[in-house]
Image (cartoon, grey):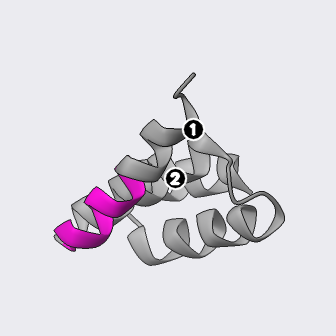
Amino acid sequence: MVDTGMIFYNARQDDQAITQCRQALELDQDFVLAHLYLGRAYEQKRVYRAAVDEYLKQRAGFAP
């Protein structure tokens, strides 16, 4: 799902990328790549608050 989300993100099909990343997060809410690409898709859509929230979740996943 995240791979598909990444493909949609790179194709600038942000709504589809968001859908795919959210589906991945339903399976694993700590999946850092899903948070990363979800944040990037939100950023492309200029939904900056949601993008920052996802980037913070992604960063928390790398915390020791």
Question: Could you tell me which residue is drawn at 37 percent across and 49 percent down?
Answer: 56
Bounds of the magenta span?
Answer: 47-55
Q: Is residue 21 left or right of residue 27?
A: left
Quadrant in which residue 51 is drawn? bottom left
Q: Residue furthest front?
A: 64
Amino acid on which the number 2 mark rests in the picture: His
Q: Is residue 63 left or right of residue 23?
A: left
Question: Could you tell me which residue is drawn at 44 percent across and 55 percent down?
Answer: 9
Depth order, front residue of 56/5: 56
Neighbor class of circle 1 (other Cα within 10 Å; few <14, some 14-19, many 20+) is some
Q: Which mark is residue 61?
A: 1
Q: Residue 58: x, y in percent?
A: 48, 44
Q: Earlier in the sequence, mark 2 or mark 1?
A: 2
Q: Is residue 22 left or right of residue 40?
A: right
Q: Is residue 58 left or right of residue 25?
A: left
Is the C-beta separation of discs 2 and 1 under 8 Å?
Answer: yes
Q: Which mark is residue 35?
A: 2
* Marks 2, 1: nearer the viewer: 1
Q: Alpha-carbon distance for marks 2 and 1?
A: 9 Å
**Secondary structure category for the residue under label 1:** helix
Using the image, determine if residue 16 lies above or below residue 17: below
For the N terminus, the quadrant is bottom right
The answer to if 7 sits in the magenta stretch is no
Residue 35 shows in this picture: yes
Quadrant in which residue 15 is drawn? bottom left
Residue 11 shows in this picture: no
Neighbor class of circle 2 (other Cα within 10 Å; few <14, some 14-19, many 20+) is many
Amino acid on which the number 1 mark rests in the picture: Gly
Q: Residue 10: x, y in percent?
A: 42, 48
**Which secondary structure class fits the magenta region best?**
helix
Q: Residue furthest top?
A: 64
